[in-house]
Amino acid sequence: MGDDEDACCAAGTLVYIPHGAPHAGTVQRCADDLPLYVVGSGTSALIIGTDIFGFESANTRTNADMLAKALGCLVVVPDHFRGSNILKHLNGGEFTAAAISAFVAKHGTVDGTVADLHNQVLPMCTA
């Protein structure tokens, strides 16, 4: 598996960006220390969930940047995995269905994500 900057897209596709390219948004923290990538502004907001490659993926942030610009709204990407992603979880191990299941079971509970959204992300979007 390559580095997370190549996760889920290939060079030449719309979301591909060169390594180290700057992003338009900033990382902010909610009251419970939940990191958020925040970009854009407006009277509406779009919340984007990440895939298993996580919050720090350059492609995730580039998509958020493009959506904020195209839609003219606030875009928020919460870090529900709290700094982890599948590559960190594998720690050089084999990328298997069992490994993905173990990562999701440890870091991606539905209850935790819903609590993050209701208690931290939505209030930030309406502030």
Image: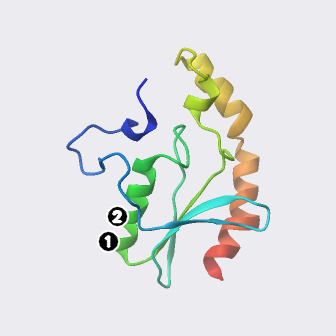
**Relative to 101, residue 49 above or below:** below
Instruction: Report if the CB atoms under discs 1 and 2 are less than 8 Å apart.
Output: yes
At 58% across and 16% down in the image, what residue appears? Answer: 93
**Relative to 52, residue 15 above or below:** below
Furthest-front residue in this view: 20
User: Which residue is identified by label 1?
Assistant: 70
Residue 55 position, x and y percent, is: 55, 49
The picture quadrant where one finds residue 54 is: top right
Indicate which disc residue 127 carries: none
Q: Name the secondary structure under disc 1.
A: helix
Pick whichever, 120 or 87, lies toward us.
87
**Relative to 103, residue 14 above or below:** below
Furthest-right residue in this view: 32
Quadrant the N terminus occupies: top left
Q: Is residue 72 left or right of residue 13?
A: right
Work out how far the residue at label 1 is from the one at label 2, CA to CA, in angstroms. Answer: 6 Å
**Relative to 30, residue 6 above or below:** above
The picture quadrant where one finds residue 8 is: top left
Residue 5 position, x and y percent, is: 40, 40
Amino acid identity at mark 1: Ala
Pick whichever, 108 or 81, lies toward us.
81
Q: Is residue 21 left or right of residue 45?
A: left
> Local crowd at mark 1 within 10 Å, few (<14), some, or many (≥20)?
few
User: Which residue is identified by label 2?
Assistant: 66
Amino acid identity at mark 2: Met
Q: Is residue 57 left or right of residue 33?
A: left
Residue 26 position, x and y percent, is: 53, 67
User: How is the model colour-coded?
Assistant: rainbow
Quadrant the C terminus occupies: bottom right
